Image (spheres, rainbow, N blue to C red):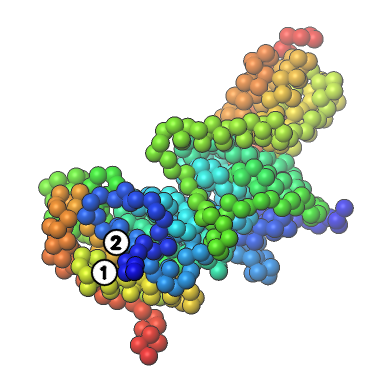
Amino acid sequence: MVVFDKPNGLTDAPFHYCPGCTHGIIHRLVAEALDELGVTDKTVGVAPVGCSVFAYNYFNCDMIQAAHGRAPAVATGVKRGEPDCIVFTYQGDGDLAAIGTAETVHAAARNENITVIFVNNAIYGMTGGQMAPTSLPNQVTQTSPYGRDVTVVGYPVKVCEMLSQIDGATYLERVAVNDVKNIRNAKKAIKKAFKYQMEGKGFSLVEVLSTCPTNWGKTPKESLKWLEENMKPYYPLGVYKDKFANEEAK
Amino acid sequence: MAEKVLMKGNEALAEAAIMAGCKHYVGYPITPQTEIAAYMSKRMPKIDGLFLQAESEIAAINMVIGVSSSGHRAMTSSSSPGISLKSEGISYLAGCELPALIVNVQRGGPGLGGIQPSQSDYFQATKGGGHGDYKLIVLAPASVQEMVDLTFKGFDLADKYRMQTMILTDGTIGQMMEPVSLEKGILNEYDKSWATNGTRGKRERNIINSLSLDAQELEQWNINRFEKYKVIEENEVMYEEFMMDDAEICIVAFGISSRVSKNAIMEARKQGIKVGMIRPITLWPFPKKALLKAADKVKAFISVELSMGQMIEDVELAIKCKKPVLLCNRTGGVIMTPDEVLEKIKEADKIGGND
């Protein structure tokens, strides 16, 4: 009897992600959600530049590889072209909160009926560990070797908090994948975001606090702990906006 | 032939795009092309189409990428500085082999430049603009009627070859009003089984991608795309010959410069100078063969253009420098007068040959 299987929403290609990186878990959660909602075969995913640029190898649905930061605009085009499709973007923090801030904010402002999976690991992973818009104050990275000096480079961008001020945005939640309980909550949030899109409810973004053992210079286990002790206090988990919370509660 | 109506170039182009089956337009305001966006914003809702004003030129071209990926005809328009911003997306369109129509109603540059007509984005349009090895099909209308005709043609070529077509026009053609016949042009249907619009359990998944970390593979993609470009160069060159039968001087001009040149040619002919014109309608592919053929019988060429001299390089290459090529140009938003062209014709007439 099979009790644990690979979701249909993932291909057989082995992930290229580093050991201990939580991208794999998040990929799986997205694929499970799409499968459970029965929409994998009408889904189009958009993965821009970053560690997850190769997501087109892993998600078992139509995929587009987009330019750095531009996924929400590409997703907008797909959704407006084929409103019947389920369209999601899968973006990292440098992509979404630095080079692609405008695309993110305005997709939310338009209440574009798409789902954004925002993987926040507080660092640029693919290019080898540079300071990200979400790197914590004093965090040491390749381009903040003495620690992020907020007097020079400013403060991290809190995406859910920022977008919660935008009238258009429908559903914003920050989750984490550093323990079983959080992973289960992350799954719920991701599934809800896709369900909202199916119901035509508009823009949803799920921010997933994620680890980057390689570029944090930590073991996978230490990384989970570092996320818990450092990222979570700065980026509190929770629902930042849900226009349909009352409806859902019923 | 449909009844003629008086229309602005930009609006005629927009209407033609709708007639050509484009139901998705994304743009951003910039002078002197804003009429296209304004026209689309009025018309699209009435035909159940999409007009979307993007937050930036960059977002607009990426929305075009999305619409085109989903299998629909997509277009955007802008003017010079906006095209620079779109160039990243145009490079991605090329890398992903996605059909799209991009309109550049040129204004003077560089930088913010001005808002008066210019042709100084010739290099950007024909030699790249964005990064990497790629070409655009570049169409240069010289009248409001051609704004219509080349819009149909542009969409058709884009779909036929999975290419990006740029309509390279200028502030004059975009802004001026002329009688135009809004007649349906080519409306071929092309296979779009490559589109990302959901597998629906009926096919393998589609991937739209321009990335390969395997150098050999990426090289092969480029070689394959250039094979396609070769076919386009063989089959899709368009140009107009004007009074070339007995010409001893050949003007090469496109768009508004060709209109000014025609006046100068008529005047020169009155004065007994045998001058004609080859007007490229496709700037890429460039009418190299026609020019090379002309080089055997004329004594000089004149490149008439609104730039510091860009197309002149292609003229010289096309004729393999067999004959002198003079430059008659104004730039920064200034248009040459027929008299200025006439002076250059007289200068060319003094060159060698029949004197």
Q: Specify few, some or many for label 2: CA neighbours under 10 Å numbering under 14, 14-19, or 20 or more.
A: some
Task: Name the foreground residue: B315 vs A27.
Answer: A27
Residue contact between numbered discs 1 and 2, judged by CB atoms under 8 Å = yes
User: Which labelled disc corresponds to residue B139?
Assistant: none
- The residue drawn where x is 63% and y is 39% is B137
User: B156 left or right of B310?
Assistant: right
Label 2: state its secondary structure.
Answer: helix
User: Which labelled disc corresponds to residue A183?
Assistant: 1
- The residue drawn where x is 47% and y is 32% is B219
- The residue drawn where x is 54% and y is 31% is B223
Residue B26 visible within the image: no
Q: Give the number of marks.
A: 2
Q: Is residue A242 above or below residue B17?
A: below
Residue B220 visible within the image: yes
Identify which amino acid the numbered label 2 is placed on: Ile
Identify which amino acid the numbered label 1 is placed on: Ile
Q: Is residue A61 above or below residue B276?
A: below
Chain of the residue under the numbered disc 1 shown in the image: A
User: Which labelled disc corresponds to residue A25?
Assistant: 2
Q: Position of residue B305 (x, y in %)?
A: 64, 32
User: B280 left or right of B31?
Assistant: right
